[in-house]
Amino acid sequence: MAGPRDPAERCSYRNTNCVERPLRRLFEGLASGVAACPWAFVLVPLLLSGGLGAGFVFLPQRQENDIEGQFTPTWGPAKAERDFVRRHFPTNDSQRFSAARLPTEGAYAALIAVATNGASVLDAAPWAEVLRLNATVHDAEYERLCARTDGGCASPNELLSRWGDAGPQDPRSLRFPVNDSIFLGTALGGVETDGGRVLRARALKLQYYLREDGPEAQDSRQWLEGFLQNISSKVAELRLGSIQVTYFTSLSRQQEFEGITKSVIPLFSVTYFLTITFAIVSCLRLSCIRNNTWLASCGVLSSGLAVLSSFGLLLFCGVPFVVTVANAPFLILGVGVDDMFIMIASWEQSLRKKEKSNVKSLLAETYSEAALSVTITTLTDVLAFFIGTWTAFLSVRSFCLYTGTAFIFCYVYTLTFFGAVLVLNHKREQGNRHWLTCMHVDVGKDQAENSCLYNACCIGSSSRQPSEPEGDHPMNVFFKKYYGPFVTNKWNKVLMVLLYGAYLVGSIYGCTQVREGIDLRNLANDASYVIPYYDDDDKYFSTYGPRVMVAITESVDYWNEAVRLGIESCAQNLENISYVDKNLTESWLRVYTELDKRGLININSKTDFLNNLNILFRARPSFEWDINKTQDEIEASRFFIQTVNVTSAVDEKNLLNELREAAKQCSIPLKVYHPAFIYYDQYLVIVQNTVQNVVVAAGAMLIVSLLLIPNPLCCLWVTFAIASVIVGVAGFMTFWNVNLDSISMINLVICIGFSVDFSAHISYAFVTSGESSANKRAIEALSLLGYPVLQGAVSTILGVVVLAAASTYIFRTFFKIMFLVILFGALHGLVFIPVFLTFFGNFGRSPNTISKELELEKL
């Protein structure tokens, strides 16, 4: 990072700060040690990485790929509600199975049969094929393991129980969605009705539930695994022509999720190849001595060592390794190379100062400038990640912990390992040795007599002679002579301000359109068999949503009419929610009360109420499972309401909020629960967690900036850049079909660190410039650090660009948001910030400083 050339010029900045000056001294001392013993600082990081890398032997034990654990809030209310249901309403899938009453999704295999050519699945030909399909699945092993009720296997579809092998009757004999007290909303899909009677149905769902309690649980799992292995071939053997079949099991989502990490492993090698190539090309010199190929390669190696050390250390410590952590190496590689470019830029700037000929002095000058810059950006990045661990999502917590720790190692290795490589490379140059062979190179030959290739590979100039230092890099010249003046032109400034206005308007509009929550289909590979199943389920079975359990959580006096009226009032309030169909409620208490009103029983005393329950159970046996009854009281009970038209994440969020709010307002203690609510809970905390992390991290960034950057103008623009980039990324990710979920929340945390990186480099170079006018200071800042910032942006994008080719949502989302982060961060650092700084160029600079600079300019 550039600062004023004359030490006297720096005093006006250093005297106002008590942190920067000690840090510079510390870095200069470290530089002296690295320059004195470079091989020690090369070997120790290599050995340390090798030792810590042994932690990867624990990787199989540390992997945690449980979807619920990673992508749902760790303290979500639905998990407590599920525990309550398990305690008070235990299941018995060997004798009295009911899918609606399960506290979990259960163990099951599902098939959706869709009639082809627009036909009805209830027609003769499709129905015959459905029967053949059912017979294939319903084998002897399934008969042994199936969840049972009424002495037999729970039917995979109510129509199979009604019609069986006799074939379809007239569909008009069926009423929809309830037929003879049987709910068909989840059995038939794409239904057309006339006066409630079925005309035709496009799809039919078969669900085969197995026992998951007791000794059969493992056998049930093996049956499901066999089902997944064989179902495709079995369906092919049936040669079905009238129906198309998609399939799914209770294991599918988890198994597909666990497999997505393997799909990204081949991309690591591509990423390292691209990054090394870019680093070498960026540092390439047409000189066989001053060629920085090994320097660039070691910079990339330094990032790799940081990944090896940090991941190995955390695996040793037992930190869970979740799938989102697989994104981290791509990011760390890009950031490590960014730091390398800053170090090389500062090193070459030091080389151009003739008075700095001693290697210790050169490295001390490099560290005093670049190390402070790298410290600021690393500290802000690490703080952002460690603040990100204060979240309700394990996927975010693990990613932030692994990545933050890797950034620390990356920083340490940059200042030790890479600094030592700088020293060794300089000694090679001083000895006029070839970059590849380390052999002496001819000096002083007439280069005009030879080809350019020969001159580049075999001719050098003696670095030990007082020759002219190398000129500026062509890109630095471009920023100084062309880009800087272009940006600071007054009419172009107006254009940049208008461009920023358009950016801001688009970002704010996008923020108002943000969609929340992760779609569970996005946790599978794009080519997975579960995607067609999800598509069919959404297309044909989305009218009727979760059948929600409403539990009365405490013992109340049900025999008291006032209490019953209170419960009925609560039920009606729940039914009045727009997402609930009041005609499909299933309540034991309503039926019991109706029997009382007809005079068939008396329920107005405790004894009668409890004793007459057996009459209710004989009429409706399933109601016995809805009452947790002891000898003399009812500890808890439940009824069910049917939701409808829950077709989007917004609907899921609104449904959950409205149900819980209605339950909260009830005078009777109620809980509402469905297994899907475990995942719906993310909507309650995702925005809150994101805003909390962003605000806290941004505040921490501001404090760090104030401590390490002794100029209020620079701190102001760093803070401005943080807010502006976050708004931009949050807004534009909506246009790129990215939801606000735990995956994108990771990237918004990253946003904070990267927005500091780009803006801090340029802002600090601007405020420490010795030029007299704001335009000249902006041009100098761009000429010194424009190219390293651009290199860092490109290297980081190269580090993640291969993820765009990934076949899974998690990795593509990481690329999309990282691309936006880097694009907008670089846009602020190279375009918006330099322009805005010229408008407020003298803010924070005393009149004495300005007048002295003007006098110096005149001289």
Image: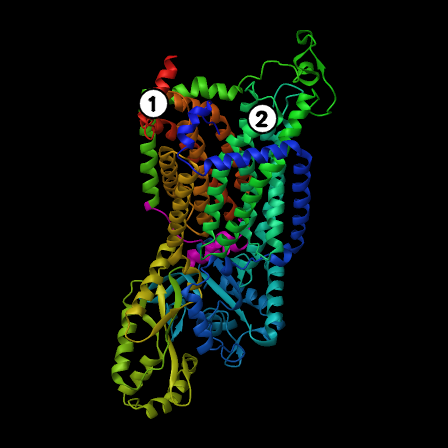
Residue 689 in the figure: left or right of residue 804: left
Q: Is residue 667 above or below residue 504?
A: below
Amino acid type of the residue that numbered disc 2 sits on in the rendered structure: Leu
Q: Is residue 273 visible?
A: no
Residue 500 location, quadrant: top left
Which sits earlier in the primary sequence, circle 1 or circle 2?
2
Q: Position of residue 220 (x, y in %)?
A: 59, 70
The foreground one among 272 and 639 is 272
| Residue at figure coordinates x 38%, y 23% from the top left | 487
As measured in the structure, the alpha-carbon distance from the residue carrying label 1 to the one carrying label 2 is 30 Å
Does the segment drawn in magenta span residue 515? yes
| Residue at figure coordinates x 35%, y 33% from the top left | 713
Q: Position of residue 821 (x, y in %)?
A: 44, 39
Check disc 2: other Cα within 10 Å, few if <14, some if 14-19, many if 20+.
Answer: many
The foreground one among 108 and 784 is 784
Does the segment drawn in magenta span residue 665? no
Q: Is residue 694 above or below residue 838?
A: below
Magenta residues, start to end:
512-540
Q: Position of residue 552 (x, y in %)?
A: 36, 76
The foreground one among 442 and 307 is 442
Reading the image, the residue beneath label 2 is 362
Locate the C terminus by quadrant. Answer: top left
Q: How many circles with numbers are drawn on the protein?
A: 2
Amino acid type of the residue that numbered disc 1 sits on in the rendered structure: Ile
Q: Which mark is residue 850?
A: 1
